[in-house]
Image (cartoon, helix red, strand yellow):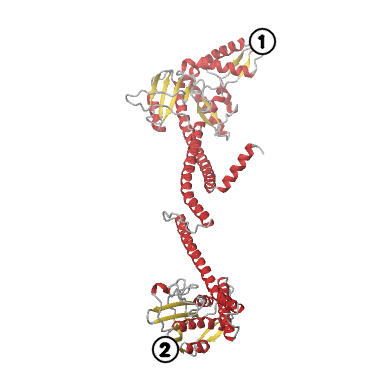
């Protein structure tokens, strides 16, 4: 694999593993897509606006150009153009400046003290002999000379009057024949008869006679024939005779080659321009801009510089977005890295690993949850070590006693009589009791504690439990008392419920001095809220409350919350002979929780303790 391929593969792995790089990549992708979409919309919208603005500007400029070309066609100079330019500026809303080289001919909105500074290129050139094809395309197609330039072709008043009379006769004749017609007077004063659609009527009613040139027009045509003929002669072509409508016919008896139409049109255009030039104003530069602007503007368009500015703006937005995202990502990644390092320390066995919590966002809450988990793990680790120590101690004591008695028998120190067998059997049963308790707790922790639930009489359960512990109570000189409603029923496993109540009774007998009393009481339980915790959970409905009370020494308030912990004892120095396995109350809690109930301990120093079991009236859900 090449170095470039290795580098690319390494970068790809880094991107997949780095949250910051993935965040930046996603942000960049989203930014590019959003900027692209926004740019596309803006460009399309701007293009539409530009086209609309261009259309309006083109219409205004076309109007301005047409008016000024018409003025130049009818005047030999620009001396009186000022009012026309001012009116155009007022109607179009633009600043219109007409210049002749270095001289300003007219300005629709002059600024006092600030001479006009033109742009390098004018908006248009006003020349009636060379009309701009973009602004007046119809005129440009007809030779480029504005039709309003008549010059020597203008008929005299007398000629115009005579032509008007003849045209009225033609119009009346056509109307009598049922053909609609109208008379149009051209710039030269010559009338033309046309249909309502603007089409010439041809030779009907003698209309063709109106096309015959008048004496003044014939003189101008003769001059034009000479100009066109000279142009064609220079090209080695025969001359032509021009008509008023712009058509021509070849001269007869010419030795030269007949002139092609293209050459005739070229010579006609140049000849007409030369003939009409003395009758029009000289060419001038037109500048159109916004009011008050010193520099003229051209038509608005989405030019390359504008597109480049849009691209730079999009790149700047992308850069700022990525920079802000990188800053936010770094601040986001920093606490995550601290969490990762702390988790790695915990994985390595450091149960004291913690992270600093700052702020109140999701990561701060995650850090707080991690710290709580770490503290809980540290507590569990301490409890595990303590439990291992306690289990070792609980199992070591009976095993040591059994081994000691057996070694004494083997060495002949103690005879193997019935007393020895009874002592070894007692230790073995105690060991079996510890093992059974640990097995029950393990099954409960694993969720494998099976219940055979049936509807039980609570009074019967308490009576059977008292009867089973009667001999032990008599030996300890403790009185057992049962107080229960005989009609009180509860769904429960009879064996597990008697085991739970029996553990409480045996624990109460053990801690009650001779002459004391252990009370077993049961009653209906209302939905009373109970503080949720390690030994109890909140009651959510009515049920049954079973209480086991003793008149022993009681438990200190600071120790009360630990009574259901495994191997916990209020008297740390209590010996095996005076105490149980240390697992009885833990088993009680697990059994009652398996039934969907709760267990609670209350105690007063010097007055005794009360353990309360709350069981719901609905059967527990199977696990």
What is the crowding at mark 1: few (fewer than 14 residues within 10 Å), some, or many (at least 20)? Answer: few
Q: Please tell me how crowded label 2 is: few (under 14), some (14-19), or many (20+) other residues with Cα within 10 Å.
A: few
The residue identified by callout 2 is: 515
Residue 68 against residue 29 in the figure, above or below: above
Q: Is residue 103 left or right of residue 592?
A: left
Residue ID at (47%, 71%): 534
In the rendered image, the quadrant that contains the N terminus is: top right
For label 1, the residue is 256
Say the numbered circle drawn on residue 61.
none
Rendered-image quadrant of the C terminus: bottom right
> In which quarter of the view is residue 429 placed?
bottom right
Where residue 381 appears, as percent x and y from the top left, is: 50, 64
Pick the front one: 558 or 8: 558
In the rendered image, the residue lying farthest to the top is 255
* First in residue order: circle 2 vs circle 1: 1
Residue 528's image quarter?
Answer: bottom left
Q: Position of residue 16 (x, y in %)?
A: 58, 47
Which residue corresponds to the image point at 56% horizontal and 24% vertical from the top-left? 142
The secondary structure type at the circle numbered 1 is loop
State if disc 1 and disc 2 touch (CB < 8 Å): no
- Residue 293, given in percent of the width and then of the height, sits at 39, 29
Q: Residue at x 41, y 25 (%)?
A: 97
């Amino acid at each position: 694999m090449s170095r470039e391929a290795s580098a690319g593969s390494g970068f790809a792995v880094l991107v997949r593993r780095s949250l910051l790089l993935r965040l930046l990549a996603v942000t960049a992708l989203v930014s590019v897509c959003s900027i692209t979409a926004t740019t596309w919309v803006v460009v399309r919208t701007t293009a539409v606006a530009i086209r609309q603005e261009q259309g309006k500007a083109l219409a205004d400029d076309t109007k301005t150009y047409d008016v000024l070309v018409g003025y130049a066609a009818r005047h030999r100079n620009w001396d009186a153009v000022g009012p026309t330019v001012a009116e155009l500026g007022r109607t179009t809303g633009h600043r219109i400046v007409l210049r002749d080289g270095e001289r300003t001919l007219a300005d629709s909105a002059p600024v006092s003290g600030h001479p006009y500074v033109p742009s390098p290129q004018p908006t248009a050139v006003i020349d009636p002999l060379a009309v701009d094809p973009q602004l007046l395309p119809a005129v440009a197609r007809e030779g480029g000379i504005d039709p309003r330039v008549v010059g020597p072709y203008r008929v005299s008043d007398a000629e115009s009057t005579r032509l008007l009379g003849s045209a009225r006769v033609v119009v009346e004749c056509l109307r009598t024949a049922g053909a609609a017609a109208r008379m149009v007077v051209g710039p030269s004063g010559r009338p033309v008869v046309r249909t309502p659609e603007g089409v010439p009527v041809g030779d009907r009613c003698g209309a063709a006679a109106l096309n015959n040139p008048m004496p003044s027009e014939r003189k101008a045509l003769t001059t034009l024939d000479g100009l066109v003929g000279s142009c064609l002669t220079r090209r080695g072509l025969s001359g032509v005779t021009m008509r008023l409508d712009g058509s021509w016919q070849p001269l007869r008896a010419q030795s030269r080659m007949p002139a092609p139409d293209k050459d005739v049109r070229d010579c006609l255009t140049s000849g007409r321009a030369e003939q009409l030039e003395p009758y029009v104003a000289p060419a001038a530069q037109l500048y159109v801009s916004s009011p008050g602007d010193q520099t003229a503007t051209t038509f608005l368009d989405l030019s390359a510089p504008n597109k480049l500015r849009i691209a730079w703006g999009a790149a700047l937005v992308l850069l700022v977005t990525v920079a802000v995202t990188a800053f936010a990502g770094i601040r986001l990644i920093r606490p995550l890295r601290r969490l990762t390092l702390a988790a790695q320390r915990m994985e390595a066995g450091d149960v004291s690993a913690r992270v600093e919590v700052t702020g109140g966002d999701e990561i701060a809450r995650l850090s707080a949850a991690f710290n709580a988990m770490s503290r809980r793990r540290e507590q569990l680790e301490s409890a595990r070590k303590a439990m291992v120590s306690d289990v070792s101690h609980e199992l070591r004591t009976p095993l040591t006693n059994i081994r000691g008695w057996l070694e004494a028998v083997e060495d002949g120190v103690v005879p193997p009589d019935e007393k020895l067998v009874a002592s070894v059997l007692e230790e073995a049963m105690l060991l079996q009791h510890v093992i059974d308790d640990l097995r029950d707790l393990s099954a409960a922790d694993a969720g494998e504690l099976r219940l055979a639930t049936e509807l039980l009489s609570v009074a019967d359960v308490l009576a059977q439990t008292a009867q089973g512990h009667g001999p032990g109570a008599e030996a300890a000189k403790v009185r057992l008392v049962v107080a229960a409603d005989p009609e009180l029923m509860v769904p429960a496993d009879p064996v597990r419920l008697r085991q739970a109540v029996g553990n409480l009774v045996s624990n109460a007998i053990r801690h009650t001095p001779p002459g004391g009393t252990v009370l077993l009481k049961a009653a209906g339980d209302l939905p009373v809220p109970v503080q949720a915790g390690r030994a109890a959970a909140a009651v959510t409905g009515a049920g049954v409350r079973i209480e086991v009370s003793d008149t022993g020494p009681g438990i200190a308030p600071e120790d009360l919350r630990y009574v259901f912990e495994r191997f916990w004892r209020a008297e740390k120095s209590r010996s095996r002979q005076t105490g149980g396995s240390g697992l009885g109350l833990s088993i009680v809690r697990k059994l009652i929780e398996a039934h969907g109930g709760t267990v609670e301990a209350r105690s007063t120093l010097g007055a005794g303790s009360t353990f309360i079991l709350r069981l719901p009236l609905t059967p527990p859900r199977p696990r």
